[in-house]
Image (spheres, coloured by chain):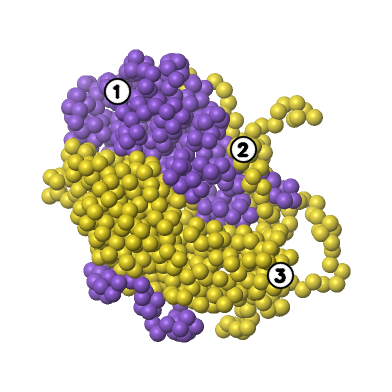
């Protein structure tokens, strides 16, 4: 087996040093009835690279990659161009095959990029501090609600109807153990009156902007209303590129920002791994979940970085930790931070403008089709349209013609009959005019 | 000293390996360089300090005059630095060189399983059909991805002897949460209210943290002097309010809990569930099926046992195998076959007959990028390779234990260990050298330290996990270094320990100062400073 360096002679010599007759003698604590033979496992034997590659390639070929078709899916995961340098750099052995930087003297590479990452996330979101990432946007949102419950010592969370339904379900599953989760009804494309629901039991209001239907929300009045009742505003962002063009949540009064960072540096990967961004105000620092990297000096006075404030974390605090999280999204936040470094201020701003311009152009083309209505009045690179017929069968029909038309809202809200004609479409820098023409042409035929 | 087949000396203590100290060697002061860099070790500024308004991508400057942003357009600059591509690449390459990695050396971090990361796995995960696939793309265009997940599920259930597996948890701790939420749902379905979870004191910190996170209270079970959980104490704590036990097996002392079947029976008789922390599954994969031990739920760290890379701390993946008693409560999404192929059930209400999902762990379907790597690993190894890997991991750990226990103190050293060898600090008593000093001295020797001060049940713990990825020559060299260091410490030749490391990119860092006055981000220098 090509990955196993020990030879039969090595094994024999090692057993002799140990003083064991055979390897099974080392498993002597295992109950005899539980020690199995190889034939117990109905699985294939060792294969060479070529055979494995053939097997995996066959599976991959049965999928339609986003880059292989005119492609308009969004709803929490976005197709963007990732510069070649990103994937090359994250595959450097020293990044790819290192562990959590618990030995800072020989992990300054990881620690410094985490420090830079935290700075970038704080700047983008307009917040004071950010952590070294969580699993993804949805789990970051759940952690944000738990944190708000801890800070306010209240249980109730109000979840905007514009919050991605998968995020809402994730929050309900975890934070619902500690209080009422109230999901508001929403008309896709418009903002519900969430302020009226905030009461003195409310720990937090969770609002996504742009929301899952694409609508850009003004968070300021919600933040003010929440603060007046002692509640926190949690702002959720699933398309982080939008912050290249939009007012950051921190400037609108958000107390915690939970975001998905996949759009920068990370591929679609059928839903994971992604990178959860988590930022807050300095005064809430010690209630934050996840790893934090901080600046310090070594004994010679040289600047260096360490994991810090770990008294919040599970390996020190055990059942009193702020979260059970152990890993972060290391390599994904490295990809994020490299891509954002390549973009810089000018690159990100331009990228965001291109995305918005593409979406505006696509919306205009679709709105010109008979019976098609673009719902949100304000959007970034994603919006919802109302079709004259149910969207899901149309999406499947278009897929058969080689056009991936978007995400039917019924896939996210299957029990809501009122949304079955709705389709969420995203346009990014990767879309060309030819893509638009292919979509409009195919859609014209299908409706 | 041994010789390898090129005739080069391989013993670490060989004087020929050392840099000769030539007459007239310069003093440290004379060695201070003009640049501040030292040979290949470059000092590297923060990327924000390298900003000079350049750009590393070429994008058209599209004007958005009449925008549809609803008046929410950003006014202020973000503050991101601007660098060209070569500068960005140099920055990250220089940073990378400050990291230790399994590709550059033995990484004996107990409990963390730093094994080889095959590059085929990376290549397969990047096939456009997997890497460039949207999670909500139409089902007809994702059949290969669903088939991949289905095949991985088959490997996991077959290797563990368990009937079901929940794939969406994103890491080990997330898997623990998934398992406990399934247990919570099963208890609720029985109309019972059980709030206590028994956790051995040797457990990973995630276990009690997860129990609290899932709304349970934690009750610690002591370990016996031989490093095993105290089964009698555990049984005595069982009662009608106990929801589950969380046991790691092999445990964090590197020992297999031999009474596990008996414990499982007692747990089940008390109406509770058995959660197994599968962090150490890599010791027994292909040898022992957890399902045969009476386990109800166990997460599998794909990044440990199946070598999807650790990536500097993530991403991980933590699918949870479930017994028949818990299978019905697995979270959405569920993968099912219908007449047309595979499909995902993404709605709680649409769950098939008998399924009662407790909820959703995360958006979408889990860590697909890790699934493709793990399946590649499994197909490469095959069942025989998986079994051999477990055996080699256990053999290598025992080889280290047998080779070092004459100088380092092994608290449970009378019998074989599993995949990791545990030492305590009693051999350092009276030397003035601490576990921390000893571990830091390893850095100067070119090694990453072992896990320190964990598990908590032994004093000054040093937990060494060599994995199956090391050659005998590599193990011998490592043993020689540790043996010599231990001899020196015991002989009170302690000079090298106190201030170690001396030869790393940084000396010991002031962690107290970092926590007392946290600096968690770069901030631009105030204008008056810049003007000075």
| Mark in front: 1 vs 3 | 3
From the image, which quarter does the N terminus of chain A lie in? bottom left
The kind of secondary structure element at disc 1 is: loop
Binning the other alpha carbons within 10 Å of mark 3 as few (below 14), some (14 to 19) or many (20 upward) gives: some
How far apart are the alpha carbons under marks 1 and 3?
69 Å
How far apart are the alpha carbons under marks 1 and 2?
38 Å
Q: What subunit carries mark 2?
A: B
Kindly identify the residue that appears in the image at 30 percent across and 72 percent down.
A31
The residue carrying mark 3 is B492
Binning the other alpha carbons within 10 Å of mark 1 as few (below 14), some (14 to 19) or many (20 upward) gives: some
The tag earlier along the polypeptide, 3 or 2, is: 3
One can see residue A264 in this view? no
Q: What subunit carries mark 1?
A: A
From the image, which quarter does the C terminus of chain A lie in? top left
The residue carrying mark 2 is B518
Q: Nearer the viewer, residue B199 or B376?
A: B199
Residue B165 location in percent, x, y? 26, 54
One can see residue B391 in this view? yes
| Mark in front: 3 vs 2 | 3
The kind of secondary structure element at disc 3 is: loop
The purple one among the chains is: A
Q: Nearer the viewer, residue B396 or A369?
A: B396
How far apart are the alpha carbons under marks 3 and 2?
37 Å
* Residues at discs 1 and 3 in contact (Cβ within 8 Å): no
- Residue that protrudes farthest toward the front in the picture: B236
Residue B358 location in percent, x, y? 25, 41
What label sits on residue A81 in the rendered view? none
The residue carrying mark 1 is A184
Binning the other alpha carbons within 10 Å of mark 2 as few (below 14), some (14 to 19) or many (20 upward) gives: some
Q: Colour of chain B?
A: yellow
């Amino acid at each position: 087996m090509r990955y196993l360096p020990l030879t039969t002679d090595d094994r024999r010599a090692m057993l002799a040093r140990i003083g064991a007759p055979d390897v099974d003698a080392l498993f002597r604590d295992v109950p005899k009835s539980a020690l199995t033979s190889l034939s117990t496992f109905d699985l294939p034997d060792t294969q060479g690279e070529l055979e494995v590659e053939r097997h995996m390639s066959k599976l991959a070929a049965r999928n339609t990659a986003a880059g292989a078709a005119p492609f308009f899916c969004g709803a929490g995961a976005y197709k963007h161009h990732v510069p070649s340098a990103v994937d090359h750099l994250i595959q450097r052995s020293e990044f790819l095959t290192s562990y959590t930087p618990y030995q800072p003297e020989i992990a300054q590479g990881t620690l410094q990029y985490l420090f830079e990452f935290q700075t970038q996330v704080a700047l983008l979101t307009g917040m004071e501090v950010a952590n070294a990432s969580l699993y993804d946007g949805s789990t970051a949102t759940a952690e944000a609600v738990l944190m708000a419950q801890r800070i306010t010592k209240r249980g109730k969370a109000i979840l905007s109807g514009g919050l991605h339904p998968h995020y809402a379900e994730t929050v309900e599953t975890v934070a619902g153990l500690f209080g009422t989760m109230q999901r508001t009804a929403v008309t896709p494309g418009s903002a519900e009156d969430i302020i009226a629901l905030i009461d003195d039991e409310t720990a937090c209001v969770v609002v996504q902007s742009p929301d899952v239907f694409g609508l850009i929300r003004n968070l300021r009045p919600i933040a003010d209303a929440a603060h007046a009742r002692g509640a926190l505003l949690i702002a959720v962002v699933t398309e982080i590129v939008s912050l290249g063009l939009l007012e950051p949540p921190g400037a609108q009064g958000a107390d915690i920002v939970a975001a998905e960072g996949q759009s920068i540096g990370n591929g679609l990967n059928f839903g994971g791994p992604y990178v959860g961004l988590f930022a807050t105000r300095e005064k809430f620092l010690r209630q934050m979940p996840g790893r934090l990297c901080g600046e310090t000096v070594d004994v010679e006075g040289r600047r260096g970085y360490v994991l810090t404030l770990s008294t919040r974390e599970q390996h020190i605090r055990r059942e009193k930790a702020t979260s059970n999280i152990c890993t972060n999204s290391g390599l994904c936040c490295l990809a994020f931070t490299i891509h954002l470094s390549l973009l810089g201020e000018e690159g990100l701003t331009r990228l965001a403008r291109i995305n918005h311009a593409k979406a505006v152009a696509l919306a205009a083309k679709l709105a010109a089709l008979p019976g098609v209505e673009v719902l949100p009045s304000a959007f970034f690179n994603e919006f919802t349209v109302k079709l004259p017929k149910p969207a899901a069968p149309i999406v499947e029909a278009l897929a058969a013609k080689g056009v991936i038309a978007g995400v039917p809202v019924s896939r996210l809200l299957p029990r809501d009959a009122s949304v079955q004609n709705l389709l969420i479409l995203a346009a990014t820098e990767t879309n060309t005019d030819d893509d638009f023409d292919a979509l409009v042409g195919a859609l014209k035929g299908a409706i | 000293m041994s010789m390898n087949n090129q005739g080069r000396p391989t013993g670490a203590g060989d004087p020929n390996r050392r840099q000769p100290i030539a007459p007239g060697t310069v003093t440290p002061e004379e060695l201070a360089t003009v640049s501040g860099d030292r040979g290949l070790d470059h000092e590297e500024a923060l990327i924000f300090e390298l900003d000079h308004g350049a750009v590393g991508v070429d994008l058209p400057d599209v004007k958005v005059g009449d925008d549809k942003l609803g008046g929410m357009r950003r006014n202020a600059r973000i503050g991101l630095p601007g660098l060209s591509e070569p500068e960005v690449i140099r920055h990250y390459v220089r940073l990378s060189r400050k990291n230790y990695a399994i590709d550059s050396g033995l990484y004996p971090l107990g409990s963390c399983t730093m094994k080889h990361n095959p590059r085929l796995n990376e290549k397969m995960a990047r096939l456009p059909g997997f890497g460039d696939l949207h999670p909500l793309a139409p089902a007809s265009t994702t059949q290969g991805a669903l088939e991949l997940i289905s095949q991985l599920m088959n490997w996991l259930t077959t290797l563990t002897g368990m009937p079901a597996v929940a794939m969406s948890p994103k890491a080990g701790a997330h898997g623990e949460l998934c398992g406990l939420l399934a247990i919570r749902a099963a208890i609720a379905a029985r109309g019972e209210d059980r709030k206590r979870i028994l956790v051995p004191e040797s457990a990973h910190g995630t276990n009690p943290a997860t129990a609290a996170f899932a709304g349970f209270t934690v009750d610690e079970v002591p370990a016996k002097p031989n490093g095993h959980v105290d089964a009698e104490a555990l049984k005595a704590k069982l009662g009608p309010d106990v929801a589950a036990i969380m046991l790691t097996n092999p445990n964090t002392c590197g020992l297999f809990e031999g009474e596990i079947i008996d414990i499982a029976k007692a747990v089940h008789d008390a109406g509770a569930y058995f959660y197994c922390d599968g962090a150490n599954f890599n010791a027994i994969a292909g040898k022992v099926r957890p399902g045969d031990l009476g386990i109800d739920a166990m997460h599998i760290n794909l990044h440990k046992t199946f070598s999807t890379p650790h990536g500097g701390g993530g991403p991980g993946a933590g699918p949870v195998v479930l017994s028949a008693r818990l299978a019905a409560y697995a979270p959405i999404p569920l993968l099912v076959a219908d007449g047309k192929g595979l499909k995902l059930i993404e709605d709680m209400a649409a769950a098939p007959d008998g399924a009662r999902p407790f909820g959703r762990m995360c958006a979408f379907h889990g860590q697909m990028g890790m699934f493709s790597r793990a399946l590649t690993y499994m197909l490469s190894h095959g069942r025989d390779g998986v079994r051999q890997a477990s055996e080699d991991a256990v053999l290598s750990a025992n080889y280290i234990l047998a080779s070092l226990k004459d100088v380092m103190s092994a608290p449970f050293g009378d019998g074989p260990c599993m995949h990791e060898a545990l030492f305590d600090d009693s051999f350092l008593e009276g030397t003035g050298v601490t576990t921390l000093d000893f571990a830091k001295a390893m850095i100067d020797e070119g090694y990453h330290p072992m896990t320190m001060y964990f598990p908590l049940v032994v004093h000054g713990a040093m937990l060494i996990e060599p994995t199956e990825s090391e050659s005998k020559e590599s193990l011998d060299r490592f043993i020689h270094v540790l043996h010599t260091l231990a001899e020196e410490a015991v002989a009170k030749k302690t000079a090298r320990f106190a201030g170690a490391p001396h030869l790393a990119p940084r000396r010991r860092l002031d962690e107290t100062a970092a926590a007392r006055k946290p600096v968690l981000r770069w901030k631009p220098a105030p204008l008056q400073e810049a003007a000075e």
